[in-house]
Amino acid sequence: MVRPSKKQQIPNLQEAIKETAWKQITETGTAALSLRSIARELNITAPAIYNYFADRDALVTALIIDAYTSFGDSQIAARDAISAEKMDERIYAVGIAYRQWARTYPQRYQLIFGTPIPGYVGPFMEILPSAARSLGALVSVIEDLRIANKLKVDRYPNVQPGHEEEFDVWKSFAGNYDILSLAVSMLIWSRVHGLVSLEIANNMPPFGVNGDALYMYELEATVNQFVKR
Amino acid sequence: MVRPSKKQQIPNLQEAIKETAWKQITETGTAALSLRSIARELNITAPAIYNYFADRDALVTALIIDAYTSFGDSQIAARDAISAEKMDERIYAVGIAYRQWARTYPQRYQLIFGTPIPGYVGPFMEILPSAARSLGALVSVIEDLRIANKLKVDRYPNVQPGHEEEFDVWKSFAGNYDILSLAVSMLIWSRVHGLVSLEIANNMPPFGVNGDALYMYELEATVNQFVKR
DNA sequence: AGTGTAAATATACAGTGTTTATATTTAGAT
DNA sequence: ATCTAAATATAAACACTGTATATTTACACT
């Protein structure tokens, strides 16, 4: 038997490979991702995967884009659940959804923002669209604040020109926002990411404050810092 | 030739293995760490390493502890370069040293705070001493602030009891500080880590604000938030 | 001098990503 | 209906990886 007849083949093998990859990542972590073990579970041979993904890194890239899309969906849904005028509430909603998604899918979070795959470096321009879309939820709220003249940013560091190409791609997927809104969003994002990534990676000493309360405390501090009242 | 005479042997092979590991990590990243390639470079066989480290994870743990020690040295040196009364200046010094160390040794930073070694999970209690010591530099300054009644922490989330054993180990290496100082330090740490880790991992969009200025902006915001004046 | 131990090698096993060549099924064109 | 070509899978092999086992040898101590 060199090639099974189509009757016994898996339909949509490309999707099946990704699904099996996610299943294994969820069960045993991102580090355990292995083309051969995926093939074993699908009862195919490892080289067959190369008909659907150029190499292991291409599969990882596809997984990352899928994860960003899921992440972005939850970000956008959280934002849109609050009416557009209540901007600070939107910030809280997006912030809470951020942590919730990360805690629900810790492996996906690490796959996106960590570097758990040995040797893998993502193709920036390929990933940027889905990344821009997911971070765009926060950016859009900050931009609304800025337009409403409620963004408190005295002496904010100057934004630098350059990287026009990446910026254009960003704008085409996240929205055409002022670069100041983008820069402020990056700082807010880094705060949220700081707490969440340490929590996910269990790098926070296990003693200390309640995670939920600490996270809300940080969100409040951030809103107080950046929103005029 | 089954065993070379001691004359041609490498003295202090344990140290030599670690040094070679660091060299390779610096040159080709944490992901490329390999016992066999270390052995090749030292002109020994791979199993010989097992006389000095129980397995690959034990070597990684030793590297992490060394990295924490180097990191802690720089933290403590930065703190002690400023006289103890100038507490806010000490926070800046420790914060700046944090980013500087991370940018000087990005691979070591990722080794400590990321998860770039597939399947490796560090033995918490073994690493805690060196970790506590390095983070203790910041904690000690926050504790000084608290004692001087200059710590601005209205409505800070309650600290939780439990984990007494880890806490005792922490205190024996970082100092016997109030748990509130510890908790505040964790939040400050998460902010610094958020910015630095995104910068190190190149996960920050390359457009935006100047890295140095943004980092100082965040340090100032943090000092303004937590230090009474 | 003899012996025991420690430290290295040699060998082997199971796993990984990937390449190459080969076989077969399937779709499309004559 | 038949021939051809592309698509899709396998089989085998290569160069790696960490690690276990058995063996050999150098050295230190009695």
Image: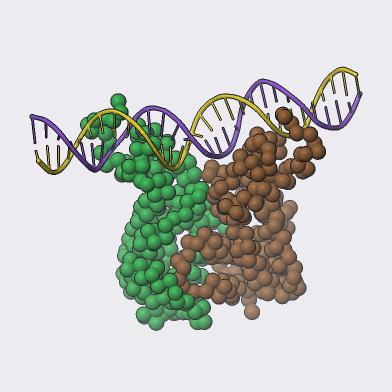
Chain colours: A green, B brown, C yellow, D purple
Determine if residue B119 is in view. yes
Residue B214 coordinates in the image, percent (x, y): 53, 73
Q: Is residue A1 left or right of residue B213?
A: left
Determine if residue A202 is in view. no
Q: Nearer the viewer, residue B177 or B39?
A: B39
Location of residue B189 by image quarter: bottom right
Residue B157 coordinates in the image, percent (x, y): 55, 62
Q: Residue at 47%, 76% (x, y): give it.
A: A160
Residue B133 coordinates in the image, percent (x, y): 70, 56
Q: Which quadrant is the N terminus of chain B positioned in?
A: top right
Q: Is residue A2 left or right of residue B130?
A: left
Q: Is residue A49 left or right of residue D25?
A: left
Q: Residue at 71%, 35% (x, y): give it.
A: B51
Q: Which quadrant is the C terminus of chain B positioned in?
A: bottom right
Q: Residue at 47%, 54% (x, y): give it.
A: A121
Residue B74 coordinates in the image, percent (x, y): 70, 63
Location of residue B222 by image quarter: bottom right
For the image shown, how many numbered marks are present on the structure? Answer: 0
Q: Is residue B128 left or right of residue A143?
A: right
Q: Residue at 48%, 61% (x, y): give it.
A: B203
